[in-house]
Amino acid sequence: ESWSPEQISGRLKKEHPDMYVSHEAIYHYIYSLDGAQRKELISLLARSHKTRKRKYTNKTGPKTKILNRIGIEERPSIVNERKEPGHWETDTMVCKSNVPAINTTVERVARFAIISKLNRKNAYNKARSLIDRFSQINRELRRSITYDNGTENAGHTMVNHSLGTKSYFAHPYHSWERGSNENINGLIRRFIPKKTDLQSVTEEQLAEIEYKLNNRPRKCLNYHTPFEVASSLNFFKL
């Protein structure tokens, strides 16, 4: 069902305490194997890494030319601490040709994800996609959106005007500043590998992936699902 070892372990402990097994035991078993069985089980992990070590870059780059850009350092601390729902992160996933693209957006408290297809990767299509999808979210739960510095995010003021959001921008090459979004992108890549021609990916497929990710238990949510948390916070218009 595309659940991680932590999700399996956490939900199992919640629903069947007498059958509990730790996620470390699951990982240890998988990585202790050899040959074809090891390869098969690693391929079932969310990112299929041969090791579990994460790598980050200290690379810095030139300043962005996006107009009316407000840096993430000015984002209120209540957003950084995930103490208030309604603050989102967004990104654009591309294939080799950059046409089309996939827009991914995730809420920082509930980890609720929105996934949409863009026929072309540009500022207008990105803004229209956000506006269309956020029309299903209650206004008080669309407080801010944090972007990266891609030119497709130049329409952020159009989004703010339509939705009543505020926009913030991460530092160039600091993907960890949008950690929730990066995590979701990694999970989506399990269903849509990097070499996939996005022209062949349908809206129906993206809707199915979105449904699966929003209905998987998350360790950071005490093994509730993003949909359960979002519903409890009245995210959705009736």
Image (cartoon, rainbow, N blue to C red):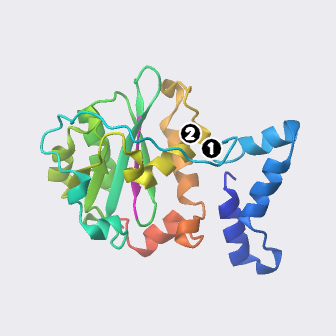
Is 116 in the magenta? no
Left or right: residue 39 versus residue 238 is right
User: Which residue bears the numbered disc 2?
Assistant: 189
Dot 2 falls on a residue whose secondary structure is: helix
Give the CA distance from mark 1 to mark 2: 8 Å
- Name the one closer to the observer, 190 or 59: 59
Q: Secondary structure at mark 1?
A: loop
Hey, which quadrant is residue 65 in on the image?
top left
Which residue range is magenta in the image?
A: 102-108
Task: Please state which of the two labelled residues, at mark 1 or mark 2, is closer to the viewer.
Answer: 1
Q: Quadrant of residue 7?
A: bottom right
Instruction: Give the numbered dot on residue 113.
Output: none
Q: Quick check: 102 above or below 84?
A: above
Nearest the eye: 150 or 130? 150
Would you place residue 60 above or below residue 169 in this image? above
- Amino acid type of the residue that numbered disc 2 sits on in the rendered structure: Arg
- The numbered dot on residue 47 is 1
**On-image quarter of the C terminus:** bottom left
At x 28% / y 39%, what residue is drawn? 149
Tell me the residue at 55%/39% (across/down).
205
**Number of marks in the rendered image:** 2
Q: Is residue 237 visible?
A: no
Magenta stretch, main secondary structure, is strand
The percent position of residue 168, horizontal first and vertical second, equals 24, 52
